[in-house]
Image (spheres, rainbow, N blue to C red):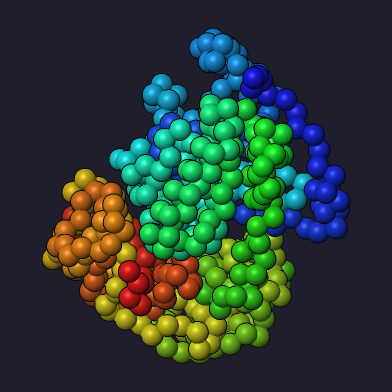
Amino acid sequence: MTTTPTTPAPNPASASQSATQPKTLLRFATAGSVDDGKSTLVGRLLHDAKAILADQLAAVTATSRERGFLGGEFDFALLTDGLRAEREQGITIDVAYRYFATDRRSFILADCPGHVQYTRNMVTGASTADAVVVLIDARTGATEQTRRHLTVVSRLGIRYVIIAINKIDLLDFDRQTIEAVEDEVRTLAAEIGLEVPHLIPISALAGDNIATTSANTLWYEGPALLELLETLPSTEADTADREPFRLDVQTVLRPQGGLAPGLDAEEFRDYRAVAGQITAGQVRLGDEVEIHPAGIRTTVTGIDTADGPLDSASAPLSVSLRLADEIDTARGSVIAAAGTLPPPRRDLRAEVFPFTAEGLRTGQRVLVKTGTTTVKGIVTITSRRNLETSTLEDAEELAGNDIGLAQVRLSAALPIPDFRVHGPAGAFVVIDLQTGNTLAAGIHTPEENS
């Protein structure tokens, strides 16, 4: 069976749709245990989506031949393992972000590491994803790291979970063996509390069920992986309607010279705006907004960008807002649609993911950063998740790569929403008070959930 890359056939349905509908954006991540084939899968996706430049394709082809990869055949993993240490060791260490598009959709892909010591990178890569593709080697089935990754996915509330059962070509596409792995995964997902994920048998190296469904798995009735990714409902399209407007203020603009696009000299002389990135929802001219910590409501009178003024803007655009009133705002302030800010609180119940070997311990004094705000805090560890049983156990400290629950007492009350409802606005990082190193990531989950 050859794995030499070829140009995939065009999809008529994709071309038809692209002519009538604008492309949507899907952010997705890949995860799985070491050697399950993540980098090979990502390389295959990039190749089949025609996102590889000719010179890069030629270079990887030559390197694959020099190294004698499978008798000189094409090593798709070399398209994504960008660090020298990754290429030398044959593993993924850092999160590798890739951008590509098909006729139907644009993608931002995060290829996450599989090794246990780099689980923190998987948390980082998956935290902003709409979907996660978790690979499982069909020969070994689910591993401890599979359970760890699915637990992280569950706690982060990822919208769509796809289980890709890889290397089915090494099992001669045996249906009975593959379906046994699928049953194992369904049982594991139920234990963790995940809804039944999409299950796709694939061969990343040979291309089975990647861009098109394979003749080697006629018993599989679902879509190919790329087709599924193209057709998952887009969160980008409905975020503006689902989420209330929210902007974390980066700075206040009071320019002293020059002119802003779309403004005359008189308007610019009195110009004052608050700048930042819209983290959720949409804002329009005339909208009433509320500002924290001022606790004052006002109206949006201008929405400015580097390209000129707008009548409306949506996440994740960075904008400058002109307000009807000169309210005391600074970096760390939050502007939101009137009546939608959650009550400011000093006590957070949170799921935490330690990033360092030292972990976290009860009584530790830290800095907590959410959005553009940083305040002091004290951590109290309450429990640790047992990854073998998916249950909570009492604990007073968490080691690196543990997952657990904590109470975080803040020095100032902040309007942090529930992460599971409002996404990134409910996330934070825990920072060492002395060194400035990032100790952990956290998500605010005020309601009890086991």
Percent across and percent down for residue 125 are 46, 49
- Could you tell whether 405 is left or right of 38 in the image? left
Residue 161 lies, in percent from the top left, at 52, 55
Q: Is residue 204 something one can see in this rendering?
A: no
Q: Position of residue 186 (x, y in %)?
A: 47, 54
Left of 326 or right of it: where is 211?
Answer: right
The residue drawn where x is 35% and y is 82% is 344
Specify whether 102 is left or right of 357: right
Measured along the vertical axis of the image, is residue 327 above or below residue 358? below
Q: Position of residue 6 (x, y in %)?
A: 72, 25
Figure quadrant of residue 88: top left
Residue at (28%, 62%) from the top-left corner? Answer: 391
Q: In the figure, residue 139 lies in which quadrant?
A: top left
Quarter residue 313 falls in: bottom right
**Quadrant of image for the C terminus:** bottom left
Instruction: Judge from the rendering whether residue 27 lies leftward or rightward of residue 115; answer left or right.
Output: right
Residue in view at x 23 percent, y 60 percent = 384
In the image, residue 253 above or below residue 30: below
Q: Is residue 286 visible?
A: yes
Of 83 and 148, the residue lying toward us? 148
Report the front residue among 128 and 393: 393
